[in-house]
Image (cartoon, rainbow, N blue to C red):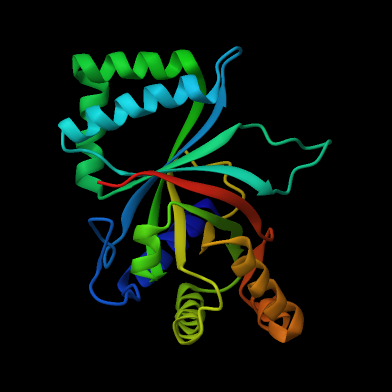
């Protein structure tokens, strides 16, 4: 069963990554060619006792200087939960999540320098003294992007929806392509849609893959909910019944802290 699941994920990745991202002009977004898959690192972080977010961010600012000097600077965002799945019986275990996006070669070089160079190791030690961060790696594919909005909006909202497929990759890929066409014709508040597939450290992920839907503001997010309440729920019901088991959306605030 595990082998079949891995085979399905590989096939799904090939199908998804063969589909071009929908961009207004070219295939470059924040300096990355999103016609191809990119690497997405997730840092799931909890601050150590007596450490403030300002203490932590001072280290991150030094990291940006180091990454730029070594030509390994990523797109770097930080998210905090706003409307989460957590409750008193199942509290959120982290203070925040950081996402670092880059191409694979650049990110491999970054980690080699981080673990072997003197200044990289010093920063790593400082990082670990401030917070416990569980680091995960994933494939990401941008399926829809409002380039102007994504490159200029530093304060936005991201809905996460983790899913596990019920069908083969051909059917899933076709359904997602239909959604891309619908969003392109009428974004209805959406400025970005990304598929994420864990590739390292994701054994306990809530699903096989995640939908990340990006909104510029809460008015846009609620406009999408109004569309669903006014009949769009039929499409969601079809997807959940026939294509994938999904956990439902969690909405996070997102701040873009760095672009190369």
Task: Please name the residue shown 75% across and 84% down the image.
Answer: 230
Q: In the picture provided, is 220 more to the left or to the right than 111?
A: right
Q: Looking at the image, how many numbered discs can be counted on the residues?
A: 0
Q: In the picture provided, is 122 more to the left or to the right than 188?
A: left
Residue 243 figure quarter:
bottom right
Task: Please name the residue shown 56% across and 36% down the image.
Answer: 96
Nearest the eye: 6 or 80: 80
Image coordinates of residue 204 in percent, x first then y, are 58, 41
Give above or below for 26 relative to 181. above
Residue 58 figure quarter:
top left
Give above or below for 147 relative to 43. below
Nearest the eye: 126 or 165: 126
Q: In the picture provided, is 47 more to the left or to the right than 107?
A: right
Q: In the picture provided, is 130 more to the left or to the right than 25?
A: right
Task: Please name the residue shown 43% across and 51% down the image.
Answer: 154
Give above or below for 257 relative to 166. above
Task: Please name the residue shown 45% across and 55% down the image.
Answer: 197
């Amino acid at each position: 069963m595990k082998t079949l699941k891995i085979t399905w994920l590989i096939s799904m990745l090939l199908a998804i990554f063969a589909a071009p991202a929908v961009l207004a002009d070219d295939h470059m977004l924040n300096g990355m060619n999103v016609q191809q898959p990119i690497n997405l690192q997730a840092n799931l972080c909890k601050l150590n006792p007596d450490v403030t977010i300002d203490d932590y961010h001072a280290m991150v600012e030094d990291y940006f200087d180091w990454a730029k000097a070594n030509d390994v600077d990523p797109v770097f965002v930080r998210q905090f939960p706003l409307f989460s799945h957590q409750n008193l019986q199942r509290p959120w275990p982290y203070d925040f999540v950081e996402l670092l996006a880059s191409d694979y070669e650049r990110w491999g070089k970054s980690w080699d320098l981080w673990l072997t160079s003197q200044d990289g190791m010093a920063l790593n030690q400082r990082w670990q003294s401030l917070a416990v961060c569980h680091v995960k790696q994933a494939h990401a594919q941008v399926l829809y992007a409002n380039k102007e909005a994504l490159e200029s909006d530093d304060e936005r909202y991201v809905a996460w929806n983790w899913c596990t497929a019920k069908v083969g990759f051909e059917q899933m890929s076709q359904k997602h392509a239909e959604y891309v066409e619908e969003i392109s014709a009428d974004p209805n508040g959406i400025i970005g849609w990304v598929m994420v597939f864990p590739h390292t450290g994701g054994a306990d992920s809530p699903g096989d893959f995640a939908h990340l839907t990006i909104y510029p503001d809460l008015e846009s997010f609620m406009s999408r909910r109004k569309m669903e309440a006014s009949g769009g729920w039929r499409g969601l019901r079809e997807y959940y019944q026939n294509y994938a088991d999904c956990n439902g959306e969690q909405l996070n605030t997102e701040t873009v802290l760095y672009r190369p």
